[in-house]
Image: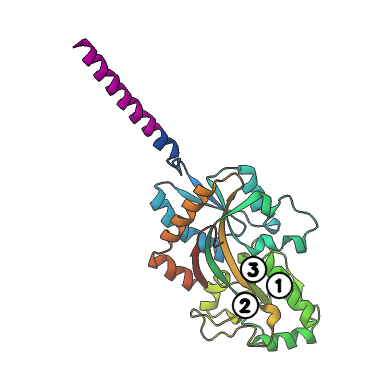
């Protein structure tokens, strides 16, 4: 009898040991909980920019999905370096960079040296949208279209002025000036959204920016959107021609916004966040509001970005 009890006891112990090993293995393989606290999105542009609009729409849905706050931190200025530096210094998988990709891919062509290496320090997480870039004129100017403005600029070299966001928008605008042989003075703004009132009042002549930047004053009739940088016309501005249509291909620019993480972020976590972004952007309210702000939703994960 004692032998039978001992044998049974050994069998029970073996079963329990096997269960604990299997349980511990499963627990070890389960993904770590994330997020466990507030998530921060760092942006290189100020409130009201196309990037800001997209970030706030996505953040609202992700906060509900993650049951954690998602905070927007606007760090404009410094050609995007302020935002990048803040992101890198955090070195935290709860701090993500929400940017127009061109803000940084153009840096090797514009800056002699940067305090970061995009391929080394930043990893793609999620694709958000294509940002509509537009050419906008002051309604106080006599020129009512892009060709008329260019003729006016040629007749008045150095007398007209412009506002352009730092990064790829400025790079493209400089290419436009060089290609067309124009002399237009650029007025520096820490945040190009601040240039809107100056354009409306005629203190500026032209802005090349995201449509979201000028949308309020454009809808109010204070400024004229005369061309878009996209390859094809868009539903939100059906009567505005593309720069290509007007014979000014130097103004072509398709913006792309995305979410990036730090170099230490695991592929599993990046894929998980990317999937959450795709699911969050299935909400029709997000799609409609993005489209209204002049952005074409293009949700995707890390691989797509």
Give the Cα distance between marks 3 and 1: 18 Å
First in residue order: circle 3 vs circle 1: 1
Residue placed under numbered mark 1 in the picture: 172
Give the Cα distance between marks 2 and 1: 10 Å
**Residue toward you, 30 or 36:** 30
Quadrant into which the N terminus falls: top left
First in residue order: circle 2 vs circle 1: 1
Chief secondary structure of the magenta span?
Answer: helix
Quadrant into which the C terminus falls: bottom right
Q: Does the magenta stretch include residue 4?
A: yes
Secondary structure under the numbered disc 2 in the rendered image: loop
Q: Can you see residue 243?
A: yes
- Residue 103 x/y as whole percent: 66, 62
Marks 3, 1: nearer the viewer: 1
Give the Cα distance between marks 2 and 3: 19 Å
Secondary structure under the numbered disc 3 in the rendered image: helix
Q: Is residue 115 magenta?
A: no
Residue placed under numbered mark 2 in the picture: 229
Labelled pair 2, 1 in contact (Cβ < 8 Å): yes
Judged left or right of residue 233, residue 205 is right
The stretch in magenta equals 1-24
Q: Residue drawn at (58%, 66%), measured in percent from left and top?
A: 256
Instruction: Determine which of the numbered discs, if any, sits on residue 195 in the image.
Output: 3
């Amino acid at each position: 009898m004692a032998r039978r009890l001992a044998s049974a006891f050994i069998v029970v112990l073996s079963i329990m040991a096997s269960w604990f090993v299997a349980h511990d293995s499963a627990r070890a393989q389960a993904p770590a909980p994330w997020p466990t606290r507030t998530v921060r999105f760092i942006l290189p542009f100020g409130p009201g920019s196309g990037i800001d609009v997209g970030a706030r729409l996505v953040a609202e849905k992700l906060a509900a999905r993650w049951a954690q706050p998602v905070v927007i931190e606007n760090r404009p200025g410094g050609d995007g370096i302020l935002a990048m530096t803040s992101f890198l210094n955090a070195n935290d998988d709860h701090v993500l960079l929400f940017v127009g990709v061109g803000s940084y891919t153009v840096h090797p062509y514009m800056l002699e040296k940067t305090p970061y290496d995009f391929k080394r320090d930043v990893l793609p997480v999620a694709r958000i949208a294509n940002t509509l870039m537009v050419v906008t004129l002051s309604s106080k100017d006599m020129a009512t279209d892009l060709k008329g403005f260019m003729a006016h600029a040629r007749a008045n070299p150095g007398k007209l002025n412009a506002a352009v966001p730092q990064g790829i928008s400025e790079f493209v605008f400089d290419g436009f000036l060089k290609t067309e042989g124009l002399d237009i003075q650029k007025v520096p703004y820490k945040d190009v959204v601040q240039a809107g009132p100056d354009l409306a009042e005629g203190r500026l002549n032209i802005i090349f920016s995201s449509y979201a930047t000028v949308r309020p004053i454009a809808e109010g009739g204070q400024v004229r959107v005369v061309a878009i940088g996209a390859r094809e016309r868009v539903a939100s501005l059906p009567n505005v021609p593309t720069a290509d249509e007007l014979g000014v291909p130097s103004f072509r620019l398709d913006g792309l916004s995305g979410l990036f993480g730090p170099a230490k972020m695991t592929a599993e976590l990046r894929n998980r966040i990317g999937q959450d972004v795709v699911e969050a952007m299935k909400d029709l309210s997000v799609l409609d509001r993005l489209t209204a702000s002049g952005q074409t939703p293009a949700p995707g994960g890390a691989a797509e970005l």
